Amino acid sequence: MRTETIRFQAIGLTVRKTVKCSGCGKRLSRQRRFEQTLNPYNRRDGIPKTREQIFEEERAAAAEWKQQPETCTACLDGAP
């Protein structure tokens, strides 16, 4: 039996944010990658998504993530 590997193109963006810790006020920097693949199985309402639709979805997810507060590891561990 012969198999074929298909690699779908990843579409997305890397976002960085700098915020203050919600516990101690220390300045934090975070980075996250938001992406989806452009493939025939990635659908919206039964129709495959376009590159623009995927990018807009990921941009909206990134904007929502940038608004969320962050807590430093020291505050999570309970250190003063």
Image: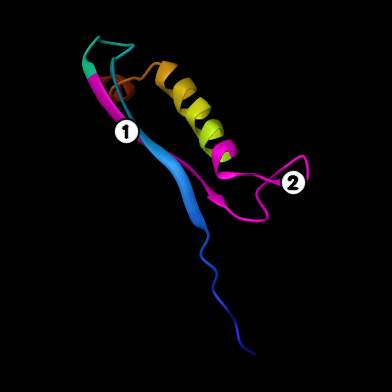
In this view, the mark in front (2 or 1): 2
* Residue where numbered disc 2 is placed: 47
Q: Amino acid at mark 1?
A: Gln
| 33 with respect to 56 (left or right) | left
| 17 with respect to 26 (left or right) | right
| Relative vertical location of residue 28 with respect to residue 2 in this rendering, above or below | above
Please tell me whether residue 47 belongs to the stretch shown in magenta: yes
Label drawn at residue 21: none
Q: Earlier in the sequence, mark 2 or mark 1?
A: 1
Looking at the image, which residue is at 45% across and 28% down?
62
Please tell me whether residue 61 belongs to the stretch shown in magenta: no
Q: Position of residue 47 (x, y in %)?
A: 74, 46
| 16 with respect to 51 (left or right) | left
Q: Is residue 27 visible?
A: yes
Q: Is residue 33 visible?
A: no
* Camera-side residue of 39 and 33: 39
What separation in Å lies between label 2 and label 1 (alpha carbons)? Answer: 32 Å
The range drawn in magenta is: 28-53
Q: Amino acid at mark 2?
A: Ile
Label drawn at residue 31: 1
| Relative vertical location of residue 74 with respect to residue 49 in this rendering, above or below | above
The part of the image, by quadrant, that contains residue 16 is: top left
Q: Please tell me whether mark 2 sits on a helix, a strand or a loop.
A: strand
Q: Please tell me whether mark 1 sits on a helix, a strand or a loop.
A: strand
Looking at the image, which residue is at 36% across and 20% down?
70
Q: Position of residue 59 (x, y in %)?
A: 48, 29
The part of the image, by quadrant, that contains residue 26 is: top left
| 48 with respect to 57 (left or right) | right
| Relative vertical location of residue 26 with respect to residue 33 in this rendering, above or below | above
